[in-house]
Image (tube, grey):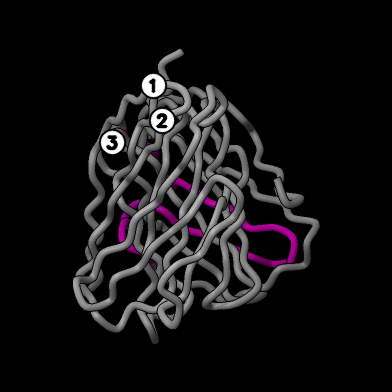
Amino acid sequence: DAGITQSPRHKVTETGTPVTLRCHQTENHRYMYWYRQDPGHGLRLIHYSYGVKDTDKGEVSDGYSVSRSKTEDFLLTLESATSSQTSVYFCAIGTGEVSPLHFGNGTRLTVT
Amino acid sequence: GENVEQHPSTLSVQEGDSAVIKCTYSDSASNYFPWYKQELGKGPQLIIDIRSNVGEKKDQRIAVTLNKTAKHFSLHITETQPEDSAVYFCAAREAGGGADGLTFGKGTHLIIQP
């Protein structure tokens, strides 16, 4: 898994509660990404980072925020979880803008 | 932005036969095309990729072909085995798309029948 650890692997939470997902890498890659995977939609980019404290929005960023205070950690926060955010979330890392992405094993989030 | 269409959504083949998955893309400036394999409960794993200056690339039983004129690329798996059963995703990256320029297809569930 290219040295990528996502935590937690599974989480159930209630609507309206804040949730933070963590991605930790040991590869010292510059780029980190958060994707969500839903049936019929494939993989959609939420946010990405191109360096410490450098982040930008992806295709489906509404309702999500991110932070990257260290090269190895990229956090995804749902400020107030909604049922539409029930999904499997994947973190990915890469060495450059045009480079293969390596994915973690995902976090399954259920919002009740 | 880039749009990637992937077909079929489900493909069932007999063990030992070949499987072909096709993707089309919309942006003629796209220059990088990876394929990922996802097994149940795991993240997508890169299996092969091709850049726009190459028409075909092979790695053992797996090959990818690219037709820039028609804007489509395909994954070919020969002599399929039970462990090839998985969901496969294609993707395309726009030239100049920056770090966020990778767009994925919706996936193909490949089933290898014994």
Task: Using the image, name the chain to which the residue with label 1 belongs.
Answer: B
**Mark in front: 1 vs 3:** 1
Q: Residues within 10 Å of mark 1 (few under 14, many from 20)?
A: some
> Which image quarter holds the N terminus of chain B?
bottom left
Q: Is residue B46 left or right of residue B113?
A: right
Q: Is residue B86 above or below residue B114?
A: below
Whole-angstrom CA distance, mark 1 to mark 2, is 6 Å
**Mark in front: 3 vs 2:** 2
Q: Which mark is residue A12?
A: none
Task: Using the image, name the chain to which the residue with label 3 belongs.
Answer: A
Q: Which residue is mark 2?
A: B17
Of all residues, the one furthest to the top in this rendering is: B114
Whole-angstrom CA distance, mark 1 to mark 3, is 38 Å
Question: x and y percent of residue A50 in the render?
Answer: 58, 75
Q: Is residue B96 left or right of residue A107?
A: left
Of all residues, the one furthest to the bottom in this rendering is: B96
Q: Is residue A17 above or below residue B22?
A: above
- Contact (CB < 8 A) between labels 1 and 2? yes
The amino acid sitting under disc 1 is: Gln
Q: Which residue is mark 1?
A: B14
SS for dot 3: helix
All told, the count of numbered labels is 3
The amino acid sitting under disc 3 is: Ser
SS for dot 1: strand
Q: Which residues are magenta?
A: A58-82
Instruction: Write the residue at 55% across / 35% down.
Output: A107
Question: x and y percent of residue A1 in the render?
Answer: 70, 45
The amino acid sitting under disc 2 is: Asp
Q: Is residue B84 left or right of residue A87?
A: right
Q: Are marks 1 and 3 on the same chain?
A: no
Q: Which residue is mark 3?
A: A84
